Structure formats: structure tokens, C-alpha cells
Amino acid sequence: MASNPLHGLWTLTNRELKKWYKAPVVLIVTLIQPIVWLAFFGKSMNMASIFTNGSINIPGLNIPKQIIDQIAQAYLKSTFGTTDYFSFLAASMVTQITFFTAMNSGMSIVWDRRLGVLDKLLTTPVPRGSIIMGKVLNSVLRSLAQATIVLIIATLLGMKFNTSLTPLGFALSIVGVYAALTLLALGFSALYLTLALRSTNWQSQMAIINLLNMPLMFASNSFYPIKMMPWWLRPVAYINPLTYVNDITRGLLLGISAFSIPMDFFYLALFAMIFSTMGIVLSWRFLSEG
Amino acid sequence: MLGDSAIKAINLTKRYGPILAVDHINFEVKYGEVFGFLGPNGAGKTTTIKMLTTVTRPTEGTALVGGYDVVKQPAKVREVIGVVPQDFTSDEDLTGWENLMLIAGLYGIPKREAKERAAELLDLVELSHAADRKVETYSGGMRRRLEIAMGLINRPRILFLDEPTLGLDAQTRAAIWSYVFKLKEQLGTTIFVTTHYLEEADQYCDRIAIIDHGRILAIGTPRDLKKTVGGDVVMLQVAGNPEAAVKVLQSIDGLSDVRIVEGFIRFKVNDGSKAAPLIFDVLSKAGIRVTSIAIKEPSMDEVFMEYTGHSLRDEWGSREEVMAMRRIVRTARR
């Protein structure tokens, strides 16, 4: 019996997924935040119109509007790598939704412990690591589904992709984006699950989520490039995995990448591997009581 | 290698901070036996089950379950056991059927076979009609029965039941015991069950261990345990000071173990009904008036009192004490 450990893994993943597609309300609620960012913030914080609304008038100087526009375009291009700030933001929102979903995975183990389900799982021959990895896998699949929805909404709102991409190139780019998001979800959900291994308290889990959520978002290139940050914030942005995922999504979808994409992948793979391994190893030790 | 016994506890010990929840216990359970663990709440029954089912690691000592060491071979142990924990463990968001299929998947039972077994088990616990309802809509009795079905999905050789009848009405309790009996008779399952219901232990268990404050005080068949009490138990109340009456009674031949228990004078005598008139006589000569008398053939309650010095029934009165104890243990576990 129980010769195939992957069997238990899929059973556990399926359990979580079932709850998700049976309760679409949860899905809709988690989608609200990135959509608000996209539609409210992204559409209002229109960098191009800040510079080109044509109403600046400096006394003594008579600069033709055309020149102002050109200077503005050049500045935007040198700062964001594109004149289209909305697309710049949209590419990072795909990352954001993945990150949010992954963060919440820690909650499910807290509930399993409180409701007694975990007690039952621990008496079955399923490996401890599978209990954690089933949740990680669930979170990865959820994230990808939600990222897809966000990407579709962003496109409807006017996100423009790299025009030089062939249809095949575009398909490969999407695959690349999914690969990056998978690594991100893997790493973060393993991290949050590990933090929740011994916890029975969902309030403290919520507190941890809220504590990390905003700082990680702002200490990354999600809203602005790293070179605009003060010097003391840059090191944080450089170790923040969100930065590298954003670099990949922008590089592949918009054709603007600040680093090298293979290096981005290497860093993310390392991040995902370290935290997944940590989750599995610590679950052997800490999932059971005492 | 199969050992001779289904379960063998060797100096099994669990300490939660300052509390010794289970204190160096030793016992053996034979294959095919229904073995009862009888004790009040907080006696260490659940902790013992948690160690035997590899959920909690013993602080000291170990146990062999199905021939495998719970400390060194926990994965092997998990394959041969079924567990019905005291708390509900089914997933409320799923249906009864989905819960059974989930657990079957964790044991690596092939889908087709799992479906057969799940249908069979739901039939056994009379839940077929509710199979496709979410568990959150189940009543307490239904959930308990589902838990039992979940504990049996892997056809375990050894089944652990932690207070399977706790909080259920008399009819459901009887039904659950009849399932347990079916298992023993039809599948030869060894059953380790904890309970604090004396009648249940007496009626359904082949052998019983009495546990209190983390220690095993006696082990034996219900009949043998009752025999050790030795004769009938007489409880009487007198007007005035019971101490004086105890002194008088101690001088009578054939009476043994005279003591005061919870306001009653309690003693043992070979034949209670014949001794009663004589006792009245002697006491009234000493100027002591008897206000009430009860003669009991020894029941498990007497057995329990004999070994622990207190009545198990009274434990129910101090619910607050139990809750306080649980809180301490929970805190210590963190």
C-alpha cells in the first residue's frame, strides 16, 4: 500500500483545488485588489499625460509643444524603458496576484490544524512533505489561473505587448512568464507554510502576511524602476524575488528588461528550491506535536 | 516479523512541560482483542493514543504497533492502523463521499477499489443517503459515524478509537458499538478503544486497563477485575460521627477494607444480604443509628473506585477542572 508517494500529493492538492472552484466568491475577492491597482491606479497615474497635457507655460520661454512632448517621451523611455506606464504596471500586477495568492497558503494549514483535519492526515502513511507540497502545488495552480485572468483584464484595459514578437515568440514568452510565476509561487507559498507549521492562530498569520505584503511590493520594481529608489532601499529590491519576476514579465511581454533574463530565472529557481526544501525538511520535524 | 501482540507499550511516557501526562506505562494487546482504556478525562488516554498512532512522539520509552516501533518506524505503523480521533477530523467543506475518497487516496488505494470500499463503509455506518451532502450539514452522530468509516477505509489490522461515543445519545452509542463488534467478528480487527463510560467498557471490551493520572492501575478482563474487588460492596450512612462507626465495623469478622468514601462508610463483605442484619445489630448496640444502606455486587464503578480511590462518575461534576487541565496541556504543547 501507499507505494507511490505522488499519489498522496495529488490527492491532497485536489482536495484544496476542489474547495476553490466550488467557492468562486473567494476567487473573485482575491482578484479585486490587482484589478483596483490596474483600473484605478494604472489608468489614473498616467505618466505620459503628466508631461504631455500641453498646459505648461514657462514665462520667458516659448517652447513648441512638439518639443516638450519629445523631451517627455525621452524621459519616460529612459526611466521606465517604455512610454506606456500602464503596460509597465500591468506586467507587475501579474506578479502581484501570484504573490498575494501564495501568501495566503499559510492560512490553510492553520485551519487544518484548528479543524482537526491535520490530526487525521498525520495518522495516514502520506509523507509529511506531501502535506506541505500539496498546499504549495495548489497555491501554484491557483496563482497561475488568477494571473491569467489578470493578464486578460489588463489586455482589455489597454495593455500593449511587445510589437516585434511573432505569434510563436509571444506563445513562448507566455510560457516563460508562467515558469517565472510558478517559481515565485513555489518559493513564497513554501515560505509562508513553513512559518505556519506550528501555528494554531490565524490572527498572527494574518499579521505576518500584512507585515510583509506592502514592504515587499514597494521595495521592488513593481511601480518604479530600482534606479529611482534611495540608495538604502536598493539592496532590498535586489534580493526581493518580486523584482526578478517583474523583470521577466516585462522583458518577455514588453521587451524591456533591466537585467539578464537567464540570470533572473537562475535567481528565482534558487529561491524556489531553497524554500521548498526548507518547507519539506521542517515539516518532518515540526508538523507533528512535540 | 509479526510480534505476538498487536500492541506492546514499553515504558511509554509523555511529558508536557511540568505535567507527566503518561507515566511509564507498560501493556500488551493481543491480536483480535477489543482492549479498553478506561479513565477519567485528563487521565492520559488521548495522549497514549496519539503516541501509539505516531501523531505525537513519546518523551521516553516506545511501543510496538503491529510489530513496528512507533518511534523508529512510524511510516510502517501508519500503514497498518486506522484511527478515529476524539475530535472531528473530516473536512467540512467536502461531502462525506469526498472525505472517504480523500483518505483512500492518502493510503494509495486504487480508485476503483476505493469506490467499492467507500460505498460499503457508508452502508455499514448507515450514511449512504447523506454521501453527497457537505459534512458541515451532518449531525454529531453522523459525523462520528463518518469518522469511523474514514478510519476503516484502509482495512486496518488495528483500529484506534478515541472516545467513539463521547457526547452521543444512548441509541447511537449502542449502534456504534455494534459496528465495532461487527469489525471484530467479521474482519478480526484488533480494537484499542478509550472510554470513560464504565458500562461500555464492562459490556464490550475483552480486556480493560484502568488509567488515572497517567498511570495504569490495573489490567484484566472485566470479570477478573470485578473479582479482585472481593465480594459485595456495602455503602452505609449513619447519624452522627462516622468515625466511631468505622471503629465498630473494623472489629467485625468478615468485613474488610472499611473506609470512608465521599461521606459514605464503604466496606467489603462476602455476602452482603446476610451480613446486613448482623451489622445493624452490632451498630445499634454501640448506639449508632444507620440512616441508609446499599449493597452492591461489584460493578466497574466499584472496580474503578477500588483502584483509584475515587468514583469515575464524580469526575463529570468537575468539568471546569478538566477544561483547566486541557488548557494547561495545550499551552505546554506549543
Image (cartoon, helix red, strand yellow):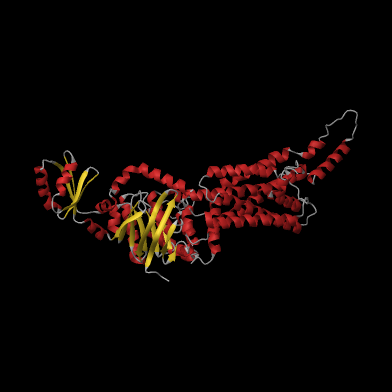
User: Residue A115, percent across and down?
Assistant: 47, 49
User: Residue B233, percent across and down?
Assistant: 19, 51
Could one spot residue A155 in this view of the protein?
A: no
**Residue at 33% across / 64% down in the picture?**
B33
Could one spot residue B201 in this view of the protein?
A: yes
Q: Residue furthest bottom?
A: B1
Would you say A166 lies left or right of B236 here?
right
User: Does A224 sit above or below residue A255?
Assistant: above
User: Residue B173, percent across and down?
Assistant: 32, 53
* Towards the viewer: A103 or B114: A103
**Residue at 39% across / 49% down in the picture?**
B140
User: Residue B44, percent across and down?
Assistant: 38, 52
Would you say A170 lies left or right of A59 here?
left
**Residue at 35% across / 63% down in the picture?**
B29
Name which quarter of the figure residue B244 lies in.
top left
* Towards the viewer: A168 or B41: B41
* Towards the viewer: B270 or B90: B270
**Residue at 84% across / 43% down in the picture?**
A74
* Towards the viewer: B207 or B204: B207
Total marks placed: 0
Name which quarter of the figure residue A223 lies in.
top right
